[in-house]
């Protein structure tokens, strides 16, 4: 990814800038017409990320859904509103206290699971976002984020990995929680997601 951006003369610009917001804006602009995988055919737009580039906490979800595809921001559909509400209950603001991105930047048709080749094509973008933001801790939101970020090719259940700190593929501490879409189907998971998010912020704040 960095090699590709360097070839375009963009990577140097991004890596040299100390303004993370500006770096992310340049980066987002450079991939807005990406056609590296089949998902470009059905998307309305690339959903890059949102929030505070200087936040200590980064959430990484799976892929945009219908509302995210229309609005251009991650986690703004029904599941995203639940996530936003949980953050508010904890006294956190999604634009101020966290940066949010997805593993996959374009909406899979009918919100199907992303395919391995689509993930492979898109993750260099996430890797570079993480490099720019360099958060203190990452929260993997949902299975596909957890598989990739924690290098869990054995594909465990979220219940097997949540509740404890892991070292991510980036060398940055990471936790995992259920996707809020799962909590819409099974409301008892909402309390567990809240618990996990609280734990992540406590870790980030050093308590
Ligand atoms: S999902 Fe990622 S790799 Fe595929 S077209 Fe969209 S931005 Fe490009």
Image (cartoon, rainbow, N blue to C red):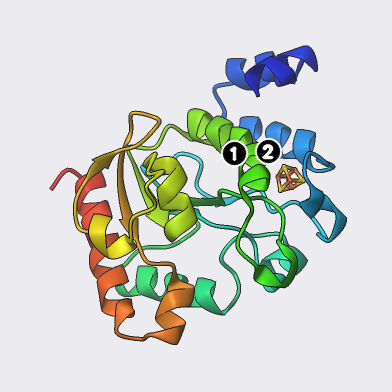
What crowding class fits label 1: few (fewer than 14 Cα within 10 Å), some (14-19), or many (20 or more)?
Answer: some
Q: Position of residue 86 (x, y in %)?
A: 36, 73
Label ID, residue 121: 2
Which quarter of the image is occupied by the N terminus? top right
Please say if the residues under marks 1 and 2 sit with CB atoms less than 8 Å apart: yes
Distance between mark 1 and mark 2 Cα atoms:
6 Å
Write down the residue under mark 1.
Answer: 123
Task: Give the left or right position of residue 199, taking residue 134 as reference.
Answer: left
Q: Secondary structure at mark 1?
A: helix
Residue 36: quadrant of the picture: top right
Q: Residue at x 67, y 50 (%)?
A: 105
What is the count of numbered marks?
2
Q: In what quadrant does ligand 1 lie?
A: top right
Judge: label 2 CB < 8 Å from ligand 1.
Answer: yes
Q: Is residue 59 visible?
A: no
Give the answer, above or below, for where 2 lies relative to 145. above
Q: Residue at x 56, y 48 (%)?
A: 103
Q: Position of residue 81 (x, y in %)?
A: 51, 76
């Amino acid at each position: 990814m960095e090699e590709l951006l360097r070839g375009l003369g963009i990577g140097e610009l991004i890596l040299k800038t100390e303004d993370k917001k500006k770096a992310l804006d340049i980066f987002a602009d450079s991939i807005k017409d990406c056609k590296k995988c089949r998902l470009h055919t059905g998307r309305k737009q690339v959903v890059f990320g949102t929030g505070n580039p200087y936040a200590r906490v980064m959430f990484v979800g799976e892929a945009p859904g219908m509302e995210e595809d229309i609005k251009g921001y991650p986690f703004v559909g029904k599941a995203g509103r639940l996530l936003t509400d949980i953050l508010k209950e904890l006294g956190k603001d999604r634009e101020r206290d966290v940066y949010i991105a997805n593993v996959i930047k374009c909406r899979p048709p009918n919100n199907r699971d992303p395919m391995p080749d689509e993930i492979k094509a898109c993750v260099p973008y996430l890797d570079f976002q993480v490099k720019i933001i360099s958060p203190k801790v990452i929260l993997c939101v949902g299975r596909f984020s957890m598989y990739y970020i924690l290098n869990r090719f054995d594909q465990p259940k979220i219940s097997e990995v949540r509740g404890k700190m892991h070292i991510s593929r980036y060398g940055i501490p990471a936790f995992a929680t259920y996707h809020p879409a799962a909590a819409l189907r099974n409301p008892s998971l909402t309390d567990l997601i809240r618990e996990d998010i609280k734990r992540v912020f406590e870790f980030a704040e050093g308590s």
